[in-house]
Amino acid sequence: MGHATLTVKAVNALLTPTVRGRRGRVDGEIARMVAAAEAATGASAAPHREYIEDCRFILGCYADEQEASFLGWTAIRGDVQRRITNRLKVAKLIADRPRIEDEPISAPIVVTGLPRTATTLAHNLLAGPEGNRAPLFWELFDTMPGDADQAAREASIAATQQWVASMNKAVPVFPDIHLMDALRPEECVFLLPFHSFLWNMTGPLERYREWCAERDYTEDYRYFKQALQILQFGQERKRWVLKSPCHLWSLDALVKVFPDAKVVWTHRDPVTVMGSYCSLVEVGWSVYQRRLDPEVLGETCLSMLTEAIASARASRLRLGSENVVDVGYPHLAGDARNQVPPLFHRLGLPWGPAEAENLEYLLDLPTRRRKHEYTLSRYGLSQNEVEAAFGDYTSLVANLPALPKRY
């Protein structure tokens, strides 16, 4: 399948030599970003030294990539800049308006599961009821209080929409894999600072993954909670509906910060998941890497996803049964009309004509776009290898019961 356009490949081939020596530029880049963030927000970066050092580490990990491209280096610098600026903005908003931290974030619904397991469908369904609310893409990029100036909001929306347009232009197949829009609900990972799930869309980053394996994500979720409180401030309080596969790596920290969270964990045959996920990651690597080895990509993806399941299953043993609801992909995507109403009931959500209509609309969406095609063998993986790597999780998924119709 096609990924990055010929123009992207040509630009990377032509201009990548201009970013040679990028490893030596990391400290200067971070200093420039911090200065720009302080100027934009009027806040001091001094209280955020640890966060900034983490950003320095991330940028350094990408700089160390042998095949890092010109466009990749440009894009990742922009992303780190945005994150530092938003971090300072969130802190300043709370310092200026302390009542923001009084905002309750009650019983948020958190959709997670391996990538390509209908998490997006579940997210959009559960965010549908009038009393629910999901963070929109532009809000994850540029966090503003609910009573923010309309002109500032519109400017932020336009900037986010431009980012989406640039991505879709560089990789025309991307909307077929994961449709994004500034005004649509989007993944928490665009605000959560340091999850390898997102950053490994840029390349193998082995040193970064090792660092993530030892990381305590509690402070990341506290920051995320502050952002939700800002978004809620000055508006009607609604129940938050969040979503990202990244939560599989950090369920303990998530529930520590949101103890009444309801986690909806979607499950699907990992053999099917792997081919689809590898194809998604190849989209990212095709922009961020000058050349990529599909088999290295396959090894990286398999390792990441088996780690995610192992981490989440270990956390699951420590969590209360009231925190997690398991939903099988065949039930959600194949038998949604029968399975979604019990899921809503389990989560204490209303089910009526409006919710049923939203379900029909969302189920119809995939038929309006081209099919996302992929093969497992392209990435040097076989069905037997994937099943062996996931162990008994494969049979657990195959035998997952449907949600009961009554409680």
Image: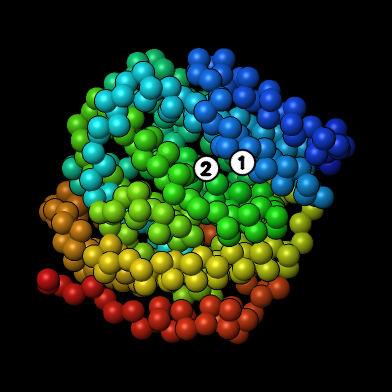
The residue located at (42%, 39%) in the rendering is 223
Quadrant where the N terminus is found in the figure: bottom right
**Location of residue 6 in the rendering, given as x and y in whole percent from the top left corner:** 75, 44
Closer to the camera: disc 1 or disc 2? 1
The residue located at (41%, 54%) in the rendering is 253
- The disc at residue 54 is 1
The residue located at (63%, 37%) in the rendering is 53
Side of 311 where 32 appears, left or right: right
- Is 95 placed above or below 397 here? above
- The disc at residue 193 is 2
Residue 368 visible in image: no
- Answer with mark 1 or mark 2, whichever residue precedes in sequence: 1
Whether pointer 1 and pointer 2 mark residues with C-beta atoms closer than 8 Å, the reply is yes
Q: Amino acid at mark 2?
A: Pro
Side of 381 where 219 appears, left or right: left
Q: Secondary structure at mark 2?
A: loop
**Location of residue 407 in the rendering, given as x and y in whole percent from the top left corner:** 12, 71
Q: Secondary structure at mark 1?
A: helix
Q: Quadrant of residue 281?
A: bottom right
Q: Please rate how many residues cluster around mark 1, counting C-alpha atoms within 10 Å: few if below 14, some from 14 to 19, many from 20.
A: few
Q: Please rate how many residues cluster around mark 2, counting C-alpha atoms within 10 Å: few if below 14, some from 14 to 19, many from 20.
A: many
- Is 206 placed above or below 381 here? above
**Location of residue 82 in the rendering, given as x and y in whole percent from the top left corner:** 56, 30
Q: CA distance from mark 1 to mark 2?
A: 9 Å
